[in-house]
Image (tube, rainbow, N blue to C red):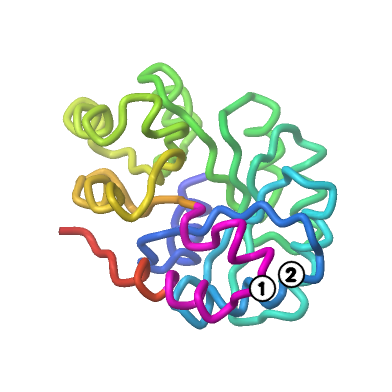
Amino acid sequence: MASKTDRLLALLDGQPVIPVLKIGDVAQAVPLARALARGGLKAIEITLRTVEALECIRRVAAEVPEAVVGAGTILSPRQFEQAAAAGSKFIVSPGTTRELLAAASDSEVPLLPGAITPGEIMTAREAGLDFLKFFPAEQAGGAAFLKALASPIPDVRFCPTGGIGPKNASDYLALPNVVCVGGSWVAPDDLVQGERWDEIEALARQASTLRKQ
């Protein structure tokens, strides 16, 4: 698992914000990915919260070589396999289960599983995973909670997601155990529906300038 974690970190390549996307119109997937990549956010997470999600992943993987497309909201090994087959470069799940860990161990595609309690984090750590999703971040205690985890579990790093936006992203990025944050604010629904790609590119460019303090 450790080598897969290294591969996942290489895919994210110092990107401070990972756009978390819910796309309901397949035709919008490619121009959205291109706009985000132009703004400096090449790694994106397309969540499996719509029936179109897998096709969106396929199109981005095939038509936007500058993007690094991942799949989010993966809840089962079957979804893991479907997302990997569609071209996902990484897989994100809201939690951690034995079944998902087994699916990840059999795949070359790295998994970023969710964990929020010390017990869940230690279980993932024992499975060889030291880079985890912290979700839902704000509702689970926010930056203060993650800061408290840095001392007793210093070798585990996180990508917090949930309730994070431009006003509090820097609070998380300032923590030693945070690699990046996930957020949807760089591609709000109204801009996506209006196909206002230039405005999304501008939001992505602003987010790409956020750095650890």
The amino acid marked with disc number 1 is: Glu
The amino acid marked with disc number 2 is: Gln
* Vertical position of residue 137 compared to residue 12: above or below: above
Residue at 83% in and 61% down: 55
Q: Is residue 56 left or right of residue 139?
A: right
Residue at 66% in and 81% down: 65
Across and down, in percent, residue 141 comes to: 31, 25
Residue 28 is labelled as 2
Q: Please say if the residues under marks 1 and 2 sit with CB atoms less than 8 Å apart.
A: yes
Q: Is residue 120 magenta?
A: no
* Vertical position of residue 177 compared to residue 189: above or below: above
Residue range in magenta is 184-204
Residue 31 is labelled as none
**How far is mark 1 from mark 2, CA to CA?**
7 Å
Disc 1: which residue: 195
Across and down, in percent, residue 42 comes to: 52, 72
Q: Earlier in the sequence, mark 1 or mark 2?
A: 2
